[in-house]
Image: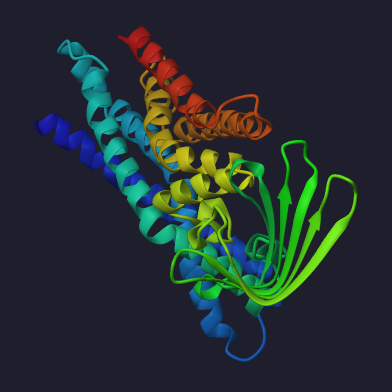
Amino acid sequence: MRLFRYVAVRAVVAFAGALSAVVALFLVVDFAENASIFRGPGWVGAVLELYAAKAAVVAYQVAPAAMLLAASVAASGLRRTREYTALRALGLGPWRIAAPVLSVAAAIAIAIAVFDDTLVVDASRRVEEIMAVRFQRGGAWQRWHEPKRWFRGRAGRRVYHLRGSGAGGAFERVTVLEITEGFRLARRIDAARMSPGPGGEWVLEGVEERTFRDDGQMDLARYERRDYRFDEDPDSFSVLPGRPAQMRRATLLDQTRLRRRLGLPVVEFELEWSNKLAYPLAGLSASLVALALALRRERKGHLTASLVESVGVSLVFWGCQGLGWSLGLSGRLSPQVASWAPDVIFLAAGLWAIRKST
């Protein structure tokens, strides 16, 4: 137990040092790069809020890499002081080092996942908002936060074009298209306003209803106010704007179900939902690979070797993750496989390498 606690403490200290150094370096470089755009009344307070939020986002992004560096540094430190040699002389294998380090990595992975769901999603959204609204940088903000206009109803029978904010479930300048099974326009309803009624119906005001007959003729009817029974209730149109990465896991799941029902793209939402757990746990499998490299026989170098190995493992892992994400977006892999494949591959490689070093 003392050995377990001793190695675990070294891993925690190494992780805290690596994470702090990487986050501080990133913030300094980022400020130097963007300093020219920070101007105007109250810019100091806006910048302080911006970089407080960025610190949380960057900490989440680099935490798995910091964990694998910590694993490598902790193992290298034990080799440098000959403590690992003494352990091997006593007949103790590499798992006496790997077990406490991986326990720390698992605890940190859980903390990272909770940290993302409770703080990072809001911090990431705030970073983009400050850059776009306060400093006029970040064109993607408008694209991701533009309200959705087009929706497909259940079974594809209706197509809705809704404008307005949707506050209280009401929309302005509404168009509803009803499609037959042969994909022929059967009816078009235009209304100045659409709002939910007390009995589950939709109340349309300023209505123009066009009915298209099979013989090509059209009938036009106008109503000041009319109730309609559509298949979709007000919650069916509660599509949230924003990046999937800036949503909590429960929200992502709800939005995925809603978007699938409305015929909107869902692949990126499914990928992000799986990645919310797969990415924090990447530090566990990558740390196992880093430990195997640090504890291999006839390894030379300590801190420098750890840095080089950690950078190499990180690059390979992120390359695999990028490839999996691309294959997932293209539909060649399921979102679950695309998100978890890098973790599984590195876990298998690490277990094999640790076994070879025994």
* Quadrant position of the N terminus in the picture: top left
Which quarter of the figure has residue 150? bottom right
Q: Is residue 93 above or below residue 229?
A: above
**Which residue sits at x=39%, y=61%?**
119
Name the foreground residue: 261 vs 209.
Answer: 209
> What scheme was used to colour the molecule?
rainbow
Front residue of 351/186: it is 186
Q: Residue 130, image x and y in percent?
A: 59, 74
Q: Residue furthest right?
A: 216
Residue 174 position (above or below residue 77):
below
Determine the residue located farthest toward the left in the rendered image: 1
Say how many tags the image has: 0
Residue at 39% over, 54% down? 117
In screen coordinates, is 202 left or right of 136? left
Residue at image point 64% right, 65% down: 147
Choose top left, top right, bottom left or bottom right for residue 76: top left
Where does the C terminus fall, quadrant-wise? top left
Placement of 223 over or under 245, stated as above or below: below
Q: Position of residue 185 (x, y in %)?
A: 79, 48
Pick the residue in front: 295 or 188: 188
Horizontally, residue 6 falls left or right of residue 269, namely left
Residue found 22% across the figure and 31% down from its top: 100
Asked whether the viewer can see residue 113, the reply is yes
Q: Residue farthest to the bottom? A: 41
User: How far from the left and from the top, in percent, is residue 101?
Assistant: 28, 32
Query: Can residue 55 be seen at all in this image of the molecule?
Result: no
Residue 97 screen position, x and y as percent: 25, 25
